[in-house]
Amino acid sequence: MLLDNPYISDVRVEKETNSLKNAGFNVSIIAYKDIKQKKKEIKNGCEILRILDKNLENPLSKTYNFKLNFFINKIIKLEFDIIYCHDFYLLKLASKLKKLKPNTKLIYDSHEYLKGWPFFLDNKGLINKIKGYFVWKKLIQNEKKYIKNVDLIITITDSILQKLGKLNKSANKVVIGNYPEKIKLIKSEKYFHEKFNISYGNKIIVHSGSIYHSKKELLQLFDEIKKHNELVLIFLCNRPYISEIKKIVNSDLQLNRKIFFHDYINNKNKLISILSSADIGLMHLRLTWTAHKIGFSNKLMEYIQAEIPIIATPQEFTKTINNKYNCCVFYKKHNNEFNKSLSKIITNYEYYKTNSLNASDQFLWEYESDKLIYNVKKLIVK
């Protein structure tokens, strides 16, 4: 298994490796180097080799081809029957390995829709944005070229699968949602109130994980929070963007009393328990980015597991879930529309909370695990 991170905490990969291991597969993970992590270790019964590096993320760098060939020569000496490639950065490496061992099967597990994810726009400064644009275009070109060598395409939504399927019509294809493993929810109903000294009469909105608001959207959101005396907002996030948000909040006395910050919790059981002490989950995506519009939302799953209603931008996947369970209220802009959606949830709170509870047992990794094993085994006998 090829992985574009050091495998310190990657819940999706952990679920997949455990499922494969329990089905009788021997799984080794080749991941990025990290000076704080062991180069080689056994984790949950899987061998981890941390030998790759971030040079593989820039196919236009001067050292890219040298590094690529260096890693190919290292990995090809190992014994393997299946190459399981996570995401686009390592697809060229995986494809080159398959070419050298043509009897191996290649799985491409795509967590994002690369062509619809212009991540370079988040780079600081015009020059870095321009450089990032050309790297992005080259990565798209590589995905289009090397996906043709893939035997099984795995991705997270039907819409992404349709788009990737057009690039390789002969490959097997399956959607495997990044659903959580079943847990026994231990509610922490007083956690946020006690940690931040929040009155029990207040309504707590929580935002978990990466923040995709523009600065303008954040200011609009904060204005809406100010209008409601009973509302507070809590961000659970460790990303660099949070430091900019803290500066905005600290410069405004009113916001300082209504907006709080908490580190993101990597332990999923603990995270869900903490989220359950909020009243409403906030999910905001960049719907101008196709990758967000047609992608999967981990936030949605976290909020549903925490059994809290959700106020969200209308992503395709979320709308599909909501058509059946009606645990979300949607908005497009932080203005009157956001206010109306918020009021709708608060007025009908028990209805939406019950719906979230009813949905919490319907989206579980245990169901997705069966699909994963079936498709990998099918690949072997193909």
Image (cartoon, rainbow, N blue to C red):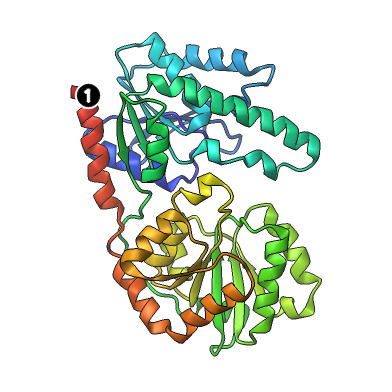
**x, y (%) of residue 86?**
44, 33
Q: Which of the pair 312/96 is nearer the observer? A: 312
**Left or right: 243 as drawn, with respect to 25:** right
Residue 82 figure quarter: top left
Residue at image position (53%, 23%) is 142
Q: Secondary structure at mark 1?
A: helix
What is the quadrant of the N terminus in the image? Answer: top left
**Left or right: 119 as drawn, with respect to 190:** right
Residue at image position (56%, 53%) is 287
Residue at image position (60%, 14%) is 65
**x, y (%) of residue 152?**
32, 29
**x, y (%) of residue 283?**
52, 63
Residue 39 seen in this snapshot: no
Q: Which of the pair 27/174 is nearer the observer? A: 174
**Left or right: 287 as drawn, with respect to 106:** right
Q: Amino acid at mark 1?
A: Ile
